[in-house]
Amino acid sequence: MSNAKNNDASQGMDFLQSMPRRWVTLYIPIGIFVFVLLFPFYWMAITSFKPDNELLSRSGNPFWIMGPTLAHFEKLLFRTEYPAWLWNTVIVSVIATAISLVFSVLAAYAIERLRFQGSKPAGGAIFLAYLVPPSILFIPLAAIVVKLGLFDSRMALILTYPTFLIPFSTWLLMGYFRSIPYELEECALIDGATRWQILIKIVLPLAVPGLISAGIFAFTLSWNEFIYALTFVSSSENKTVPVGVVTELVEGDVYHWGPLMAGALLGSLPVAFVYSFFVEYYVSGMTGSVKE
């Protein structure tokens, strides 16, 4: 009995000692990380609901709203071209992502599964193309866009965004296709299936998490892209959200912080929704795990 009591007491002491250690090593670091990560969104949200007198006032609590208002959202949605910017961003992002995924699937499958000579250097070269800074590429692309008569149109962005979306999506899908067992394709080839049938009926159903991961990345990069959208589009009704908010809501040295933050808040919601809705597929696609 005494030994049992001593064991219970030692276990209780270990529990008391483990709780402070857990707070120090787990809860406090996670809390700090979450605070640092979410505080900009909190500041953006409260600024978009603050009236101008609170935004410009030096008194009061800057981390809270005393008299919330929807005036900034009203100005943003009804007195600017923000709905058109949002619609342009959706169209450009969705179409550019779809185009990039189609070409990335074909390129990644050919490089990883057809085993032609020079496939590995080709895969490396495709990824190196993604590392070229957009600030260098937009100069020759601007000349091409002007010659094709696409300047100041959504089509200019739809055709130029895949230049940086396809290399990254191809590299990501190459890693995922590599994890799919070759035996599945060999069995299908023995049964008389063509490469196209194998891709459509076997590889793509197994690669859905990888496709979703590549799609999320491509959609996010398209949604947040700034340099190409600033260079290739000039009219207000054709601008995207990142460019329209910055160029139309800043007049010289006057920053309309309320509408600016409201526009940033509304512009970040679609991306947050996409990530939250596909988070399980996204994690699975990043790990690249396929059960044999």
Image (spheres, rainbow, N blue to C red):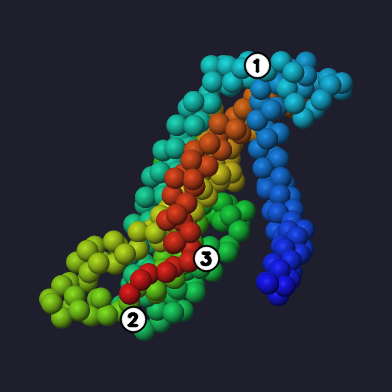
Helix, strand or loop for disc 3: helix
| C-alpha separation, residue under disc 3 versus residue under disc 1 | 47 Å
First of labels 2, 1 by sequence position: 1
The x and y percentages for residue 135 are 62, 53
Contact check, label 3 and label 1, Cβ < 8 Å: no
User: Which residue is denoted by mark 1 in the rendering?
Assistant: 69
Would you say 125 lies left or right of 115 here?
right
User: Which residue is denoted by mark 3 in the rendering?
Assistant: 129
Q: Is residue 221 above or below residue 67?
A: below
| C-alpha separation, residue under disc 2 versus residue under disc 3 | 21 Å
Packing grade of label 2 (10 A; few <14, some 14-19, many >=20) is: few
First of labels 2, 3 by sequence position: 2
Res. 29 visible in picture: no
Q: Amino acid at mark 3?
A: Ala
The x and y percentages for residue 84 are 48, 27
Residue closer to the observer: 78 or 137:
78
Instruction: Name the residue rendered at 17%, 72% in the picture.
Output: 194
User: Which residue is denoted by mark 2 in the rendering?
Assistant: 115
Q: Amino acid at mark 1?
A: Thr
Helix, strand or loop for disc 2: loop
Look at discs 3 and 1 and give the one toward the viewer: 1
Q: Is residue 233 above or below residue 227?
A: above
Residue closer to the observer: 73 or 45:
45
Would you say 13 lies left or right of 168 here?
right
Q: Is residue 179 above or below residue 173?
A: below
Would you say 242 lies left or right of 8 here?
left
First of labels 3, 1 by sequence position: 1
Count of numbered tags? 3
Q: Amino acid at mark 2?
A: Arg
Look at discs 2 and 1 and give the one toward the viewer: 1
